[in-house]
């Protein structure tokens, strides 16, 4: 049998094929490793432009609170990093925001089911040290009851100045700051309650016409908050009507307190109602909730927090306050970002250090912002629903690593979105609903035009 002789070229080709295959496989593996790195949350690093602060703790993983976040690596405290995310574009305010602004440093609040004084004041961003001192020294403040009124004033730095608790019509406790302590006093002046109904027509806009009819800024604010999820007050037209039933408590000629019992607003052919129930909340005439629930996170799944909320963080070098008004989530570029609630997109654009930036207004009290996005999927003026995909996370603006900066503002003040009290959408049932519907009959008859 003749022996087959291979040519040198054939032997060379057989040798080269596995060589280049191996090189190709190595190249793919290296490329995949490089591209995969940002997708691994444990290896994602967010480094801001502000100086770093070192903190030591005894935990073995990480700790998050209002003072920031501490990462533990191999049993040692790692460097904490935070950023200051400031968009160039501010939310355009309107006459309804002015109502909130009027009450920024002077707030009146009606106690509802589940409230504690600590949670209420935290929600309004009152200085934590003042809250602790007030609630620790005066234990009776744990006895707040549904329907009671409280009010307080703060300075521009959120320090509590005065706090008032209306226990009954002729029993008011006042806590006033003197130096670095609070001093308690009381008022027992006779209070005269007045039940009144105020009606009006829209001739210019709701705020102006409500004021002309005799409603105070605080009363207007209560109305707009009660119906904020059902009605856009800016879209009321000339000829629309409103009717308001309330109880006012008078000290002589001075108004000391007021409580909205019910409101009806007729816009075109539609009627919008808010009626006060025994639990201190407002419902429509069928006992359905007027509130909207929120998602706690703007992502489909939870992600690692790389920088926590801290509005009073001190710059380690200058000693000046350099707030971090949101929460940073360590997510890879292209992660879907979701709207945490129903609302209207008011900003969707590139905006300075915030990069690609979205702001959504939810009702009148709530605003959420989403920064450093890779891509924006919504437009200004667009109505979005809870869970809608509004953008993709990225690394735009003043950011040196892929992440999502998320903020929640209540009454134009930033709060910690991971711990803030959020509204719950629950209607009345059983005996509570039956009692409410009976109350509706008497109040709704007063609201006729």
Image (spheres, rainbow, N blue to C red):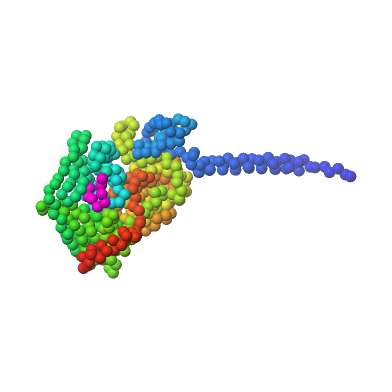
Q: Is residue 149 magenta?
A: yes
Q: Is residue 74 left or right of residue 116?
A: right
Residue 35, image x, y percentages? 53, 43
Residue 413 in view (yes/no) = no
In terms of depth relative to the viewer, which is nearer, 2 or 65?
Answer: 65
Quadrant of the drawing holding the N terminus: top right
Residue 321, image x, y percentages? 30, 36
Q: Is residue 94 left or right of residue 395?
A: left
Give me the residue at 36% from left, 41% from top.
309
Residue 413, image x, y percentages? 29, 46
Q: Is residue 32 left or right of residue 387?
A: right
* Residue ranking furthest to the right: 1
Q: What's drawn in magenta, residue-wise?
A: 143-151
Give me the residue at 24% from left, 54% from top.
221
Residue 60 in view (yes/no) = yes
In terms of depth relative to the viewer, which is nearer, 29 or 366?
Answer: 366
Quadrant of the drawing holding the C terminus: bottom left
Give me the residue at 39% from left, 45% from top.
405
Residue 203, image x, y percentages? 20, 64
Q: Is residue 154 magenta?
A: no
Give me the residue at 56% from left, 43% from top.
32
In terms of depth relative to the viewer, which is nearer, 147 or 284?
Answer: 147
Q: Quadrant of residue 399?
A: top left
Q: Quadrant of residue 16?
A: top right
- Total residue callouts: 0
């Amino acid at each position: 049998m003749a022996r087959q002789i291979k040519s040198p070229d054939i032997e060379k080709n057989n040798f080269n094929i596995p060589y280049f295959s191996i090189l190709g496989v190595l190249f793919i593996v290296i490329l995949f490793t490089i591209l995969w790195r940002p997708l691994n949350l444990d290896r994602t690093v967010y480094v801001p432009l502000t100086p770093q602060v070192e903190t030591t703790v005894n935990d073995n993983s990480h700790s998050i609170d209002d003072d920031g976040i501490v990462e533990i690596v191999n049993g040692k405290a790692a460097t904490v990093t935070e950023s200051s995310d400031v968009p160039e574009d501010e939310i355009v305010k309107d006459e309804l925001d002015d109502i909130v602004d009027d009450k920024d440093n002077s707030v009146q609040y009606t106690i509802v089911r589940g409230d504690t004084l600590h949670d209420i004041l935290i929600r309004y961003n009152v200085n934590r040290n003042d809250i602790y001192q007030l609630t620790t020294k005066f234990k009776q403040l744990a006895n707040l009851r549904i329907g009671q009124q409280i009010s307080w004033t703060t300075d521009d730095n959120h320090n509590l100045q005065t706090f008032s608790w209306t226990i009954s019509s002729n029993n008011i406790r006042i806590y006033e700051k003197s130096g670095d302590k609070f001093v308690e006093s009381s008022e027992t002046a006779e209070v005269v309650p007045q039940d009144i109904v105020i009606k009006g027509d829209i001739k210019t806009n709701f705020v102006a016409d409500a004021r002309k009819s005799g409603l105070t800024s605080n009363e207007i604010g209560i109305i707009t908050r009660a119906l904020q999820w059902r009605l856009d007050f800016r879209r009321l037209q000339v000829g629309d009507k409103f009717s308001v039933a309330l109880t006012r408590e008078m000290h002589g000629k001075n108004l000391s307190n007021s409580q909205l019992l019910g409101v009806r607003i007729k816009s075109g052919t539609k009627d919008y109602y808010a009626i006060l129930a025994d639990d201190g909340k407002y419902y429509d005439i069928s006992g359905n909730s007027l509130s909207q629930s929120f998602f706690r996170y703007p992502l489909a799944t939870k992600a690692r927090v790389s920088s926590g909320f801290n509005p009073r963080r001190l710059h380690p070098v200058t000693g000046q306050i350099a707030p971090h008004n949101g929460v940073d989530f360590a997510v890879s570029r292209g992660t879907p970002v979701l709207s945490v609630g129903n609302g209207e997109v008011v900003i969707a654009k590139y905006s300075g250090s915030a990069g690609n930036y979205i702001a959504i207004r939810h009702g009148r009290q709530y605003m959420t912002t989403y920064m450093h996005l890779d891509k924006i999927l919504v437009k200004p003026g667009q109505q979005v629903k809870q869970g809608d995909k509004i953008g993709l996370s990225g690394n735009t603006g003043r950011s040196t690593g892929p992440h999502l900066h998320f903020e929640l503002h209540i009454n134009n003040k930033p709060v910690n979105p991971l711990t803030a009290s959020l509204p719950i959408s629950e209607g009345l049932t059983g005996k509570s609903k039956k009692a409410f519907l009976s109350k509706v009959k008497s109040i709704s008859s007063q609201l006729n035009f």
